[in-house]
C-alpha cells in the first residue's frame, strides 16, 4: 500500500476540506497509511471535526498578519505550507486545491471546480495548480470537460461521497428534539449552506426570498457556513444594503458546529443551492439524505449530479417559484429519489476508486523506472 499525503488549505469547514477528511477516513478504513496536511489559521491546531485516529494530522502554523492583501496571503500560504511539508516521506502527494498544489513540485490534483479571478496572485495560483500536477481528478464529468476544453487535460472522474446515514439519522424520530431546537429558534426557514459570497449566488437568493416572503411573511432565510480566505466585504455590504431595501433580515450563523449541522439541515423547509459555479454539491446531497427538498441553480454540473431529485431554477423569480413549490409539496415524487441518490454516493466507494487510481499511477511509475534502468 502506498503512503499518501492529502493536502488542503484550511482546518475549517469548506467543501474541499470536508472532501479531504472524508476521503482520509475512508482510505484508512481500507488499511492505507494517510496523513492530512493543512495550514492552521488563527491558532487552529486541529480540524473542525474529529478525524479517524489512524489518520495523521499535520497542521502547519499560519500566523495572521495585519493589513495583508488577498494576493499576499495566497503567496504566503503557499510558502508556509511548502516550508512545513516534507514530500519525500510519501509515495503519493494528493493536493485538493490551488494553494496546496502550488506548495509542492509534484502531485496529483483534484480540481473540484474552476473559478475566475482578477487578483494576479490568484490567477497564477489557479493556472499552475492545473498545469503542473502530473495527474488529475475531478468530482464531476462537467468539471472534467471544462478542464479538457481549457487545458487539453483529461482528468479521471471520481464523484464525492456523502455521509448519508448521519443526515438521515437527523431526520429520524430519535433526533426530533434536536430539530425542534432550530425550529424554536427560527420557525419555518429556508437554509443556504456556504456563506454569503458571489459564487454562492447569495444576492440572487436574497431577491428570490423577498418574492417568496410576500405570501409567507413568517418565513426565515438562514445562512450557515462561510469560512473563506477571500475578502468578500464589498459583496457583503451590497448584500446587507439590498436586504435592508427589501425588508429582509437573514439569519447569518457563520460556521455551525459539526455535530449540530445535521439537525439544522433536517429542520429546514427547503435547502437553496443557487451557486453560479460548483464542482459537485455536497450540501444538497446531505439535504437529500435528510429528506429535505432542494432547489438548485440550473447548471450542467448540478444537472449531471442531481437531475430527477431536485428542483432547478435559473433566476430570482424561478428560484422563488421553485422554493414555494418545495415548501408546499415537500415530497412531489422527489424525496425517495433524493434519498436513494444520497445512498448511492458512499465515501467507501469513492476511496476504493481513489485507491485503484493511485495503484495505476504507482504501477505506471514502476514501469517507467524499469524501462529507464540499464
Image (tube, rainbow, N blue to C red):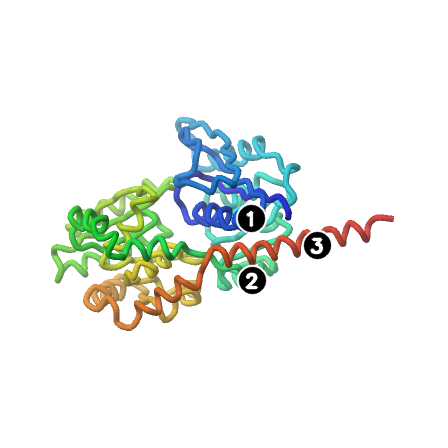
Left or right: 53, with 214 as reference point: right
Question: 266 or 170, which lies in front?
Answer: 170
Position of 1 relative to 304 (above/below): above
**Which is nearer the N-term, disc 3 or disc 2?**
2
Crowd class of label 1 (few under 14; some 14 to 19; many from 20; radius 10 Å): few
- Residue at screen point 49% across, 47% down: 25
Crowd class of label 2 (few under 14; some 14 to 19; many from 20; radius 10 Å): few
- Residue at screen point 26% across, 47% down: 239
- Residue 28 in the image: state x and y as whole percent: 53, 47
- At mark 2, the secondary structure is helix
Which numbered circle lies on residue 127? 1
Instruction: Confirm whether residue 222 shows in the render.
Output: yes
**Which is nearer the N-term, disc 1 or disc 3?**
1
- At mark 3, the secondary structure is helix
- At mark 1, the secondary structure is helix
Which numbered circle lies on residue 363? 3
**Residue tagged 2:** 149
- Residue 42 in the image: state x and y as whole percent: 40, 30
Amino acid at each position: 500500500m502506498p503512503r499518501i499525503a492529502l493536502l488542503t488549505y484550511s482546518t475549517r469547514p469548506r467543501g474541499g476540506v470536508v472532501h479531504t477528511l472524508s476521503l482520509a477516513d475512508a482510505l484508512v478504513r481500507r488499511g492505507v497509511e494517510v496523513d492530512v496536511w493543512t495550514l492552521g489559521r488563527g491558532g487552529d491546531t486541529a480540524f473542525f471535526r474529529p478525524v479517524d485516529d489512524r489518520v495523521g494530522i499535520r497542521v502547519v502554523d499560519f500566523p495572521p498578519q495585519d493589513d495583508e492583501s488577498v494576493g499576499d496571503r495566497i503567496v504566503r500560504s503557499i510558502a508556509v505550507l511548502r516550508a512545513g511539508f516534507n514530500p519525500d516521506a510519501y509515495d503519493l502527494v494528493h493536493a485538493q486545491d490551488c494553494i496546496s498544489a502550488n506548495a509542492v513540485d509534484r502531485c496529483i490534483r483534484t480540481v473540484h471546480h474552476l473559478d475566475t479571478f482578477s487578483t494576479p496572485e490568484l490567477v497564477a495560483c489557479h493556472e499552475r495548480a492545473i498545469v503542473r500536477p502530473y495527474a488529475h481528478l475531478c468530482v464531476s464529468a462537467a468539471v472534467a470537460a471544462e478542464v479538457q476544453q481549457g487545458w487539453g487535460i483529461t482528468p479521471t472522474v471520481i464523484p464525492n461521497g456523502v455521509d448519508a446515514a448521519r443526515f438521515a439519522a437527523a431526520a429520524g424520530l430519535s433526533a426530533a428534539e434536536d430539530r425542534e431546537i432550530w425550529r424554536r429558534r427560527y420557525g419555518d426557514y429556508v437554509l443556504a449552506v456556504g456563506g454569503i459570497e458571489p459564487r454562492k449566488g447569495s444576492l440572487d437568493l436574497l431577491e428570490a426570498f423577498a418574492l417568496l416572503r410576500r405570501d409567507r411573511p413568517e418565513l426565515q432565510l438562514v445562512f450557515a457556513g462561510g469560512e473563506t480566505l477571500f475578502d468578500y466585504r464589498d459583496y457583503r455590504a451590497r448584500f446587507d444594503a439590498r436586504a435592508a431595501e427589501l425588508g429582509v433580515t437573514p439569519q447569518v450563523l457563520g460556521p455551525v458546529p459539526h455535530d449540530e449541522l445535521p439537525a439544522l439541515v433536517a429542520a429546514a423547509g427547503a435547502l437553496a443551492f443557487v451557486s453560479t459555479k460548483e464542482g459537485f454539491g455536497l450540501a444538497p446531497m446531505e439535504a437529500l439524505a435528510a429528506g429535505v427538498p432542494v432547489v438548485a441553480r440550473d447548471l450542467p454540473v448540478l444537472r449531471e449530479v442531481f437531475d430527477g431529485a431536485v428542483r432547478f431554477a435559473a433566476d430570482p423569480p424561478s428560484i422563488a417559484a421553485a422554493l414555494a413549490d418545495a415548501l408546499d409539496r415537500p415530497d412531489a415524487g422527489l424525496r425517495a429519489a433524493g434519498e436513494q441518490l444520497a445512498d448511492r454516493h458512499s465515501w467507501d466507494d469513492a476511496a476504493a476508486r481513489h485507491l485503484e487510481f493511485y495503484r495505476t499511477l504507482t504501477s505506471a511509475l514502476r514501469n517507467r523506472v524499469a524501462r529507464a534502468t540499464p
